[in-house]
Amino acid sequence: MMQCHCHHHRATIFFPPVPNPKTLLHLRRPDPSRYRPLRSYLRAALDPSCPRNFSPDSASDLSRRQNALVVFPEDAGTPIGHGGRREEHEDEITRKKVIEEYSLVTRRVPRFPGSIDFARAESPDPPPAVLRRLLLDSDDLALKRALEVRRGVASETLKDALRAGRLRINYSAKIVSSLPEFIDRVVIGAAALKLMPEFAHLSFNARAKSYIQSSGVVALVKWLKHNHMTFPKIGKIICKCSGDLQLVRRVCAWLKSIHVKGESLGFVLLKASCILERSLDELKEIVSYLESNGVRKDWMGFVVSRCPQILSLSMEELELRAKFYLHMGMNENDFGTMVYDYPRALGYFSLEDMASKVQYLKEFGLTTEEVGRLLAFKPHLMGCSIEERWKPLVKYLYYLGVQRDGMKRVLMVKPIVFCIDLETTIAPKVRFLQDIGVRNEAIGGVLVRFPSFLTYSLYKKIRPVVIFLMTKAGVTQGDIGKVIALDPQLVGCSITKKLDGNVKYFLSLGIRLPTLGEMIANFPMLLRYNIDSLRPKYRYLRRVMVRPLKDLIEFPRFFSYSLDDRIIPRYEIMVANRVNFKLRYMLVGSDEEFNKRVQDAVERRKRFETGYASASTSDDEESIMVPVSSS
């Protein structure tokens, strides 16, 4: 403010606020020649010795430009002080000159602090690119504050548009908070609209609202929310799409056509890095190639949902990956099943990683075809790390006494063992075997004969079976380790459907619980047979063979032999030759050994009948000389 005093009155002149030149928010560096007339006018207005020959009326004929900033020269004169009439006259002229000069400059419409003045259309750099560069590279605090103000206005405008689209207030706030990049895009778009004649006279708020309406973001947000997408995913998807937002809708419609479910659309769009940059024809070509190699069309949505990276592959890379598996002996059915079971085996890992894992599996003695069958059966092996998963497991199994052939069997029978964690899953089960009395040298054999033992839950499966054997089946604590070592498959049996029914059946035969425990310790497989196959054998033993229950207790392995192929034919041979053996010598051995044993018994009987038989008989083998009935 400058005050002018005279003898009769005092005039007060108000100058516009003088901004700091460092805070000028022009997108282009202004041409100094543009401000030369302004500087001359200011000097003339402030210097009484300069001629004053310009009219204030000419100011109305000049064009105005919105948001321009006035730069006052640093060498401006000092305000005029007291004086006589001459000074008063000079002050009046100075006031008129300043007012006239100020009218030559575009008046700034007061909006809000930090308003930005954008360049004219003749600017060689497009305003969006310039503003983006300012957003990223500028260190000017005033500029950053101005941009934050514009962001805030754009955010509020977007919230109003979402609420106008009948979205809840809290939904609108959540969506806007997840769209920081789109807010910057609104600021840039509103700046670009100012260069168009039909939008040049509008305020920033109006231009931002127009840009939001033309982008179709409100309708897209409602559509994505209808397809079960969360607000963070909606924000990431919209920010990821740098061009036409309707492209998101078209891609989603195509994904639905290949059976991708609505709740998986957001995951696919975010994980498939360049899916929004590819044409629908390229995406359809990928799907057609997979269908031609055994991946069924109704599987495609499940495959893409679990591994969206497949849609990011080029056709050349996809063909190389498919041939990598097909050259290992897989047919189309095996390949399609593998991709369905574990799509990441095809689209996630690099070819070098896949080749190194196949080579490592071959070191166990597997051929290329065997590796192909193994990966077709358990493609999850491709998701395991050699250094972090396989090598520590191999060293641990070798320490337990498992050799290369045993590891190959474990790999072929239960390949998932090579996918589970060593410290949290395998090691506790090995320690449990040691705790129940299984010898260290026998643990390796247990794991090789029954690799599934390592996949069962220790507290839900293994421990309950062991407790059942010790409490309900009569197995003593000293024999439980022997039982598990002889038949680890018992751990895989259901207590309610198998073990409990078998125990009750044997107890119903008159066998006491401690005796049953001894029978199980000698032949643990006794509890794994079906009761329907046990009943005919027991009935034949008691009614036809007329054997006591004691014989069954001494030789519980009797139930392991076939009734039609082993028990009945050999018993008939014994009846025909009028000899009788214990169950052990009746059933054990091949047919040649059994026939030789029968012939020896017949000869001994003949010598006995003629008086030349030896008075002593073998302790292990008994021959009854009384003829056996054939009934």
Image (tube, rainbow, N blue to C red):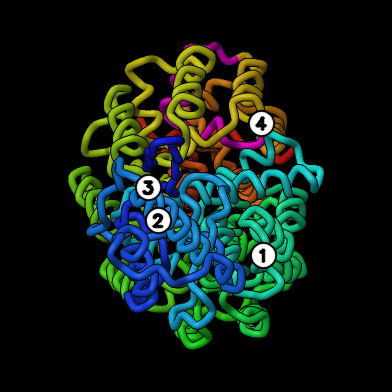
**Residue 324 visible in the displayed image:** no
Occupied quadrant, residue 548: top right
The reply to whether discs 1 and 3 touch (Cβ–Cβ < 8 Å) is no
- Cα–Cα span, label 2 and label 4: 129 Å
The reply to whether discs 1 and 2 touch (Cβ–Cβ < 8 Å) is no
Q: Earlier in the sequence, mark 2 or mark 4?
A: 2
Where does label 2 land, which residue? 94
- Cα–Cα span, label 4 and label 1: 103 Å
Q: What numbered label is drawn on residue 85?
A: 3
**Residue 267 visible in the displayed image:** yes
Q: Secondary structure at mark 1?
A: loop
Where does label 1 land, which residue? 201
Q: Secondary structure at mark 3?
A: helix
**Is label 4 or label 1 in front?**
1
- Cα–Cα span, label 1 and label 2: 33 Å
Q: What numbered label is drawn on residue 538?
A: 4
Q: Secondary structure at mark 4?
A: helix
Query: Percent from the top left, x then y, of residue 301?
Result: 68, 64
Identity of the residue furthest to the bottom in this view? 316
Occupied quadrant, residue 437: top left
The residue nearer to you, when weighing 111 against 35, is: 35
| Type of the residue with mark 2 | Thr
